[in-house]
Each structure stands twice: as C-alpha cells, then as structure tokens.
Image (cartoon, rainbow, N blue to C red):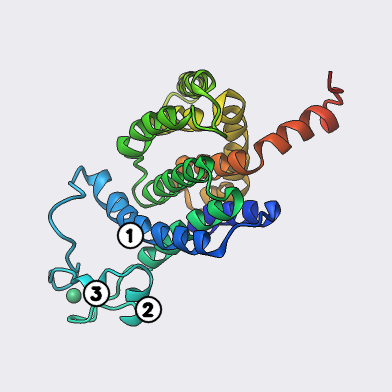
C-alpha cells in the first residue's frame, strides 16, 4: 500500500515545509476525525466499485460472517489489539484497513498543521481524502467510483469560493479542462492503439481534480501522473503485463500538484523556460 504512504506523505511534507505554528489540540483533533473518516473510506472503496450501499448492511467478518462489534471498529487501535485477526475465527484482516485509517488521519493532521483553523485545511483534507479513496479503489479493482469522481467534482465546485480555494470561475474552467484534455487523449489513444487506453473513470476523475486545482493545476496533475506512472509502474507493467492503474498515479500527481503546484509552475517558467516575471 505504497499509495497510502505516498498520498499521506504529501500532506505531512507540506505541513513540515510550512512549519506553521498551530495548536497541538487542533492537529490531534484533526487526526482523530481523519481516522474516523478513514474507517468510513474503507467501506466506500470496498462497496462503491460493487455498487453496494455504504450505509447498510453492517460490516461483517469475511471469514465467519459475524457482525463487526463496536469495539472492533476503533480506527487503527482495534486492528492492533486484535493483532490483525478476527477475534472469533482468527481469519486475517486486510492490512488495508489500518493503513487507510492511518493515512487519512495523517492527511487531516497534516492539513491542520499546514493551514491551522482555516477553511483551506478542510478543503485540502477533503481533496486528499478523495484522492486516497480513488487510489485505493483503482489499485484494488481498476474502477474509480462515480461517487469519488463526479461527487468529488460537485464538492470541489462547492468549496472553490472559500478563502484559499481557486474561486468558482477557475474551478469550473479546471473541471472542463480536465475533462476535455482527457477525452482528447482517450480519443487519440483509440486511433493510435485501436483500443481504449484511458478509462471513463480517469476522465471523470480529472474533472474532479480540476474543480479543486483550477486549469493550471489539472494540467500539472496530468504531467506528474504520467511521469510517476511511467517511472514507477512502467517496469512492473512491462515484466508482468499488468495494466497500469492510471488513477493511482493521477491521484499521486494531483497530490503533488496540490502540495507543490505553485512552486513547480514557477520553477518551470523561470528556471526551465527562463521567462522573467512582468
Ligand atoms: Zn471471523
């Protein structure tokens, strides 16, 4: 689950880089909230790709079908206390559960440390949480549920006017740019390779990323995602023939674009293209 570590790492690195002085209580509170949201995120990544409800039925053990009891649902801690096994039938519990819970806790704590008690802390944490859900769902099933992509796009547009956000105009433009550029790549890929290189989930996901990042950020996401996917998964794909879960790397690219987008665009314009400001 390098994915979890990657997306969470973006949040923590951003927090450390900022070195913001934020009260520890806010950060700890954000971590607890994040862990609980991560617990729900586990249910979403498991059920949404199968078009099942995340509300009911209650979670059950995959081994003995016993309902999971409340004290077995405490994020991270329950997994550690049960030593990774069901208390009744001793079947192994997936390590995905505590990793996603810890990853989401790190995201929310990192954003609280980075932004303090500001709206951008919530907007950033919501965005990175959606990206984590997309990455885990795509890695597991090669499916990016519409709830994350289309639902996320609606959330991104709704949060865009907040202080620190891209504003409603840039968010709408970003969503359109993300969608159109990905459709274009999919169309060119079909002409070049005679088959679908890009899933519809990837296209809708980039509309979501654009709604949170604006037009420049969504273009950066595409470049960073393609680069990371080629470098990290390219060799695996060549050796095993496994399809690249492109959504995983687009999610990582979007995390990079959120954390370091402005610095990367500035570096590219000034140090690579040598365009002077003004
Ligand atoms: Zn069991």
- The residues tagged by marks 3 and 1 sit, at their Cα atoms, a distance apart of 13 Å
Q: Residue at x 46, y 57 (%)?
A: 30
Q: Which mark is residue 3?
A: none
Q: Are marks 2 and 3 in contact (CB under 8 Å)?
A: no
Q: Which mark is residue 39?
A: 1
Q: Residue at x 50, y 28 (%)?
A: 210
Q: Is mark 3 within 8 Å of ligand 1?
A: no
Q: Which mark is residue 71?
A: 3
* Crowdedness near tag 3: few (<14), some (14–19) or many (≥20) residues, C-alpha within 10 Å: few
Question: Measured from the top left, where is residue 143 in percent x and y?
Answer: 34, 41
Rendering quadrant holding ligand 1: bottom left
> Which comes before the other along the chain, label 3 or label 1?
1
Does 26 appear above or below 249? Answer: below
> Would you name the residue on which mark 2 appears?
80
What SS does tag 2 mark? helix
Does 50 appear above or below 274? Answer: below
Residue 251 can be seen in this image: yes
> Which comes before the other along the chain, label 2 or label 3?
3
- Judged by depth in the image, the label closer to the viewer, 2 or 3, is 3
Question: Measured from the top left, where is residue 190 in percent x and y?
Answer: 45, 22
Question: Measured from the top left, where is residue 159 in percent x and y?
Answer: 44, 32
Q: Nearer the viewer, residue 235 or 274?
A: 274
* Crowdedness near tag 2: few (<14), some (14–19) or many (≥20) residues, C-alpha within 10 Å: few
* Crowdedness near tag 1: few (<14), some (14–19) or many (≥20) residues, C-alpha within 10 Å: many
Question: Measured from the top left, where is residue 251 in percent x and y?
Answer: 50, 42
């Amino acid at each position: 689950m390098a994915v979890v570590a990657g997306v969470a790492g973006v949040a923590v690195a951003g927090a450390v880089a900022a070195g913001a002085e934020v009260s520890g209580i806010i950060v700890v509170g954000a971590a607890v909230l994040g862990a609980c949201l991560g617990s729900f995120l586990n249910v979403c990544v498991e059920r949404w790709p199968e078009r099942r409800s995340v509300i009911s039925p209650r979670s059950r053990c995959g081994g003995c079908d016993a309902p999971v009891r409340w004290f077995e649902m405490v994020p991270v801690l329950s997994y550690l206390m049960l030593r990774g096994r069901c208390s009744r039938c001793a079947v192994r519990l997936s390590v995905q559960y505590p990793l996603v819970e810890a990853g989401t806790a790190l995201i929310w704590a990192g954003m609280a440390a980075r932004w303090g008690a500001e709206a951008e802390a919530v907007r950033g944490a919501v965005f990175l949480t959606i990206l984590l859900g997309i990455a885990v769902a795509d890695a597991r099933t090669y499916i990016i549920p519409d709830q994350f992509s289309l639902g996320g796009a609606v959330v991104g547009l709704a949060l865009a006017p907040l202080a620190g956000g891209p504003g409603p105009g840039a968010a709408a433009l970003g969503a359109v740019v993300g969608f159109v550029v990905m459709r274009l790549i999919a169309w060119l890929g079909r002409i070049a390779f005679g088959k679908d290189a890009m899933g519809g989930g990837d296209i809708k996901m980039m509309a979501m990323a654009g709604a949170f990042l604006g037009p420049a950020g969504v273009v950066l996401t595409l470049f960073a995602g393609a680069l990371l996917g080629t470098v990290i998964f390219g060799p695996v794909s060549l050796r095993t023939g496994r399809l690249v879960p492109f959504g995983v790397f687009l999610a990582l690219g979007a995390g990079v674009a959120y954390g370091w987008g402005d610095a990367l665009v500035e570096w590219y314009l000034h140090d690579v293209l040598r365009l002077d400001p003004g």
